[in-house]
Image: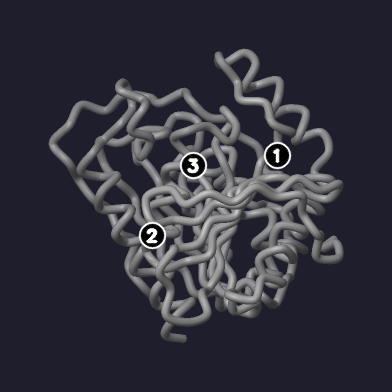
Amino acid sequence: MKDIHFFSFAMAATLGAGCALFPSGPAAAPKPEQMTAEISAVLETIVQTPQVRGIYMIPADRPGKLPGVLVIHEWWGLNDQIKDEARSLAAEGYAVFAIDLYNGEVAADAVRAGELAGAVRNRPEAAERAMGAALDYLAAQPEVQGDRLASLGWCFGGGMSGIIGSAGDPRLRATVMYYGTPVTDAARLEKFKQPVLGIWGVEDQSIPVASVQSFESTLRRQGTSVDFFYYEGAGHAFANPTRGDAYRPDAASDAWQKTLDFLELHLRRD
């Protein structure tokens, strides 16, 4: 059994109250209405279908088939910050589908963000279908290795990454959760066959460490490969550079490198 990983950074702990907190069938691969543009060596395709909407991104220079990653936004929606995160990941050599679970809306304040997140929480089956359709889209692209997919999300998206990760989709080789609500349903927990990377803030008042450690223990007991990292001096949303009150750059940088290493291991080398 691996040790629990704690990281300490010399920074004051501040609660980041910037993301929604909730735990949350694949459709046929859609034929999107699309617009493509080359932006900073990343090709972007806007996808809008009855099943799913978002942005598909691939590196402009790609030597062969790419593993795919479903990126899931925070409770603010698919805003510029999440798009930039998705672009960074695509530039690393991944096909990325940045899903939009808010039907094009981006919240301007926490009240509206909470309303939008709550609406998705009240219809978890619809969100799961949309994420499944995004995986279908990724798998159907000619430049993508359709059996080498992962999910990645922050806050609201971290919880949703756990939901799609526990749906039993055999194409998922890895799940990444940044301070998202842990999955607690026993039947869903058993479906975590792929490795799980968890990124957590010790000072997170919204996602208590005790609940995360219970989640981790359950996964380990059932034989799921788990790497959970706990950052001291960091609270909720510590990896979001637009959140000046919560952002912890050293912790965020370390977590991102661990994310890249994790995806490299399980999507490219396994």
Q: CA distance from mark 2 to mark 3?
A: 12 Å
Of 253 and 4, which appears nearest the observer? 253
Q: Quadrant of residue 60?
A: bottom left
In the rendered image, is residue 99 in sight? yes
Secondary element at tag 2: helix
Which residue lies under the disc numbered 3? Answer: 83
Type of the residue with mark 2: Ala
- In this view, 87 is above or below 4: above
Q: Are marks 2 and 3 in contact (CB under 8 Å)?
A: no
In the rendered image, is residue 182 in sight? no
Mark with earlier residue (1, 2) = 2
**Lateral position of residue 242 relative to residue 99, left or right:** left
Of 217 and 154, which appears nearest the observer? 154
The label on residue 101 is 1
Type of the residue with mark 3: Lys
**Lateral position of residue 227 relative to residue 192, left or right:** left
Quadrant housing the N terminus? bottom left
* Residue plotted at (52% across, 80% down): 65
Which label lies toward us, 1 or 2? 2
* Residue plotted at (47% across, 33% down): 80
* Residue plotted at (53% across, 49% down): 37
Categorize mark 1 by other alpha carbons within 10 Å: few (<14), some (14-19), many (20+). Answer: many
Secondary element at tag 1: loop
Which residue lies under the disc numbered 2? Answer: 91
Secondary element at tag 3: helix
Mark with earlier residue (1, 3) = 3
